[in-house]
Structure formats: structure tokens, C-alpha cells
Image (tube, rainbow, N blue to C red):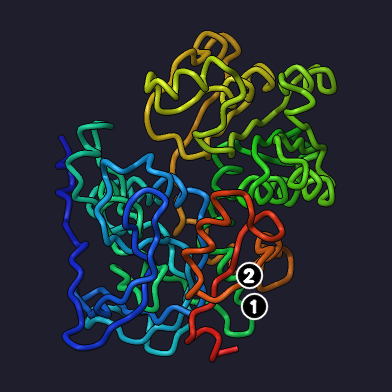
Amino acid sequence: MAEVAKPVHTTAYKPHPTEKMKAALWMGSKTIELGEVPKPTITAPKDAIVHITHCTICGSDLHMYDGALNKVMEKGLIMGHEAIGIVEEVGPEVKNLKAGDRVVIMPVIACGECFYCKRKEFSLCDKTNPSKELQQMYGHRLSGIFGYSMITGGYPGDQAEYCRVPNADLTCVKAPKNVAAKKLVGLADVTPTAWHGCELAEVGEGDVVGVWGCGAVGLSIQRLAKYRGARRVYAVDKDAHRLSIAKSFDMIPINVEEHPDPARQILSLEPHGLDRGIEASGFRSTNTVTHATMRALGAEGDSSDTASAVIKATRKGGNVALIGDFFFETNDFPIGMLMEKAITLRGGQLYAEKYFPFLVDIVADGKYDPSFMFTHEDKFENIAQSYDAFYNHKMPGGLKVCLATAFGRAQA
């Protein structure tokens, strides 16, 4: 029997003895504070210190913001896993990066050496997450992730002026200096997550695809499905503004407010069903009183409303991918429909490092532009207000904000 790789705890945060930096700190439910903390230093020989120029807030950051993960959070954790910057310093075993390189920081922290990393399934890495709680929950650990609770390793995130990046040769991707910052920040998480959704669903030439969710990830999945040759793409959401964005990209909008049973509506237009269905709305999406009540009573952590609709709308023998961040458990999952229709169901966090440099290349070559997702720009110092606006659906333009640090603004 092959030996299971032993987890390596590499989350150590060695503070600089004198220098300070600004960082977005989780201080409790709906409370993000811009605090001043010690600047990180090299802790391990494969580390790099990256001076952040731009970052953003992910929809999954809101899981921590609204209190859903309070039990696995610690006050003062630096948030964030979507950022770009300039390498300031590298450890003695970093081979491919040097000071002055512009980089995109991947959200997933992988070792590159374990069973899963050798298969390029980087978010399943055995070595970079010391969380015993996650192993008890799932039977296994997953990879470490920047700024994403203690069950993903407790790594300080990159919504900060500096970030220590473990295993930097794998976790950082060199970026051309002539590519706009918003395009590169869009490559940190959203674009590879969207590509991962298309990969899991096996989206290909001539497919009819349905995507539940028209946030930044859902819209990106839709656009990349078209890039991969999809014939028609349905966009499912409750938000009329986001649906209008989908329509502007030539998607077919399905408004759940007008069609409470979106699967029935899609099947009325596509009797054969979708070839590929992708859930990208997140675990908070509830469309029925039943699931809303169960969640309110604590009888389930996630809702299967959207997953059930995706499975129903997908043709026999088709593929379904779960990209929305489901964490816990649900009720009334249609296991019979899934089995009897011979549908392949896949999910998982993105294998970020697997999709580079391909994604950088198509952006640099002008074949795909991810900057559409940033409907607002602001100073990093206003990140607490940006969390509030994002959570309360008051973000200007309705999607994401690109935040520039003082260092980033000076580079412009």
C-alpha cells in the first residue's frame, strides 16, 4: 500500500521585527477591519514575499463575513485569496522567481509533490493543510487556501499590502508587465475557477450548456463555455441586472423570479435537455420555502435547490458540475434522478496551477478578457466598506471591485 503523504504545517507567520503593513482582518460576523499588523518575512526556503498591488473580494469571502464559518475562524485572520503584486524577496530554494517579477498569486497552496499534486489535482493536496477538523468532517484534508478559515490551513490572506507565499514557484504565476491589472486580478481565482467548471462538466464543441448563477464566476463560466465551442448557453439567476449582463454576452437568460421552476422552462426550450449543467450560485441559493425553513432551523447547512434544478434540466447521460461553494449537508437531494438518468456529477475547488500558463496566454493574446467582472474600482484602504457593499448587493455595477494598494496606485 502506498504511503499517505504526511501533512506539512507551513502556515507559520513570521512577523517582521519592525515593519508594519495594512491588512483586512476578520474580527467577527460582518466585521472586517483595516488593521496594522507586522509585515511577514521569509519563513521557509521556498517562500516569497509579494508586495501586493491589487486585490479583490471573492463571493466565497462572504461565507466568512456573514458568520457561516464562525466556528472555524479566528479573530485577526488576514482575509483574501485573489491578488497580484511584485516579488520583493525570495527564499534560497525559489528557482523561477526573482525580486521585481510581477506575479498572480494562486488561491490554492499546493506542495507539488504528493499523490494528488502529481496528478495536477492541486486543491486536493495532502501536505499543505494541517486542519484536523477538516479531516474529521470529510475523512481527508484538502489543500491550504489563503485567508480562508482555519479548516483550510489558517494561512494569512492577500488582502494586505504584503503576502508571504509558500512554495512560490508553484503558487505564483509570472505575469507580463504590459497586461492591465484588472485582467490579471481576474486570473487569480475567478477565471481558473470558471475554466475548472467547464473542465469538470466537460464542455465542448456544439454543447448546450446551462449555468446557474450570474455572478463573476457564473458569467465567466458562460463566456468560457462559448470560448470552448458551446452552441447555446443558458444563464439562470434571480438578479435582472446580472441577467442583462449575461444577455449582452449573447447568453439566453432565465429569470427565476419569472420562472420559479427553471428546469421546466429550460426543458420547454430544450426538450432533449442540457448537455452540461453547472451550478455556480453558491450554497446560499434557496428557491423554495422548504429549504429556506430547514436552513433557518439549522436542519441543513447547504440547500440542494439549485443542484436539483441542474440535474433535472440536464439530459440523460449528461454532465453536471458543482462550482458553488457547498460545504456542509443538504436534504431532499435527488439521488434517484441523478442515478437513473446516468448523469455524471463532479465538483471540487479549482486546480488553479493546472490551468496556467494557458489562461495567461489567452488573456495576453487578447482571446479572452476577464476584466469585465470589475464593475468598480477603489482604494484598498476602503476594503471594509467594499465588503459591506458586496454583501448587501450595493456594489457599483453589480459585480466585483478591484482594489489598488498605495503601492499599486504608485505603479500606475
Q: Quadrant of residue 236?
A: top right
Query: Where residue 356 sits: x, y (%)?
Result: 51, 63
**Residue drawn where x is 49% and y is 32% of the image:** 346
How many numbered discs?
2
Question: SS class of the residue under badge 1?
Answer: loop
Quadrant of the snapshot with the N terminus: top left
Q: Quadrant of residue 157?
A: bottom left
Please name the amino acid that badge 1 sits on.
Ala
Relative vertical location of residue 347 with respect to residue 241 in this rendering, above or below: above
In depth, the one of 226 and 180 nearer the eye is 180
Q: Which residue is mark 1?
A: 180
> Seen in the image, is 21 located left or right of residue 38?
right
Relative vertical location of residue 199 with respect to residue 158 in this rendering, above or below: above
Q: In whole angstroms, how far apart are the C-alphas of marks 2 and 1?
A: 6 Å
**Residue drawn where x is 50% and y is 74% of the image:** 380
Query: Where residue 131 sits: x, y (%)?
Result: 20, 46
Q: Which residue is mark 2?
A: 183
Q: Quadrant of residue 300?
A: top left
**Residue drawn where x is 52% and y is 84% of the image:** 408
Callout 2 touching callout 1 (CB < 8 Å):
yes
Question: SS class of the residue under badge 2?
Answer: helix
